[in-house]
Image (spheres, coloured by chain):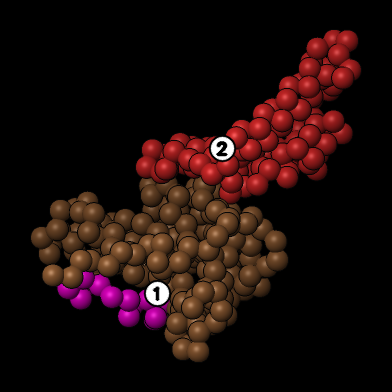
Chain colours: A red, B brown
Amino acid sequence: MTEPVWVLDEDDALEVLAHLVTAARTQVDEAAEYGPLRLLTAAHKVADRLAARASEPTAAFARDHVGPLPELAVPREGRDEYVARLDAVCAELGALLARRYVPGRSS
Amino acid sequence: MSGESDPNPVLDAIRSRRVVRAMTDEPIPRETLERILDAARWAPTAGNRHLQRFVASDDPGTLRALRMVSPGMLQRPVAVVGICVDRDLAVDYGFARHAHSLSVDVGTAAATLLLAAHALGVGGGPVTSFSRAAVGAVLDVPAGWTPEFLVCLGHPAPGGPGALRRGRRVTWQDLTVWAPRP
């Protein structure tokens, strides 16, 4: 476990908080296909900050795996490709978390 | 005619307008914003009632807060026009307060605003994904008005997220059937 590092300041966190709360409301009326899109926008907001301030493994994940995810992609068209791409990012995330939190895991 | 320009300037403007999702921080002169707003009042309104209202801002702090409460606002505009409905006036005319038909005039105003901005060399991006309650508070929208549509304005910048859907351009034939002739 590494020492805690502040990677979001109050304004950054407030922006993400505002996005999540207001997206919860807008999603009630929006097409369901926008659900993943709004969550990925939130992920991009966090990843942009992480990439600048976090430890190298976390920054690399944010930069190399979250960063390239298209912000406006929706699962309705090309659902299999969409799911496969998110699964790949999720797998990278799982590996990152294991390396960070599970003793003895280095890969 | 497919993707090429049209010799008619109005039709060409309609065909060449694009949603702008990446904008520079170059300010838009107030007189340009006023010309865009002036064009919006010419948008068709049902019964010539003019139930739509506009709240405009080019204040950086206001725009920052607006963006925070608008999940669909991916661009960083230098000005925003909020299109509202004057619900109190609509009720005076005999509409139900939340009648769906009130949204029609919001749409015509939005289309006119976007086209006017394009005609003046300003990029526009429509946003409908926002918290009405939060935007009302940020813009200090007068009582009885409800914000329904945000038009982001700014000069186009390279990059930014691509179109929501890619692939073959939709033609008018894709969208249209002729009603049977008697």
Q: Answer whether residue B153 is visible to the viewer in this image.
A: no
Please state the horizontal and vertical placement of residue A76, each as a whole percent of the image. Answer: 51, 41
Give the residue type at disc 2. Arg
Residue A3, compared with residue B54, is above or below; it is above
Is the C terminus of chain B in the top left, top right, bottom left or bottom right quadrant? bottom left
> Compared to B155, does B125 lie above or below?
above
Q: Which mark is residue B112?
A: 1
Q: Nearer the viewer, residue B182 or A25?
A: B182
Residue B101 in the image, given as x and y percentages of width and height: 22, 59
> Could you classify mark 2 by the number of other residues whose Cα lies within 10 Å: few (under 14), some (14-19), or many (20 or more)?
few
Which residue is at a point 48% across and 63% down the rendered structure image?
Answer: B170
Specify whether B48 is left or right of B167.
left
**Amino acid of disc 1:** Thr
In the rendered structure, the answer to whether residue B62 lies left or right of residue B37 reads right
Using the image as rendered, state which of residue A75 and residue A59 is in the foreground: A75
A39 drawn magenta: no
Q: Which residues are magenta?
A: B37-48
Secondary structure type for disc 2: helix
Q: Is residue B47 left or right of residue A11?
A: left
**In the rendering, at what x and y percent does residue A57 appear?**
85, 30
Disc 1, SS: helix
To which residue does mark 2 refer? A79
Q: Is residue B46 magenta?
A: yes
Q: What's the residue at 27%, 67% (across, down)?
A: B178
Chain letter, disc 2 residue: A
> Is A99 placed above or below B127 here?
above
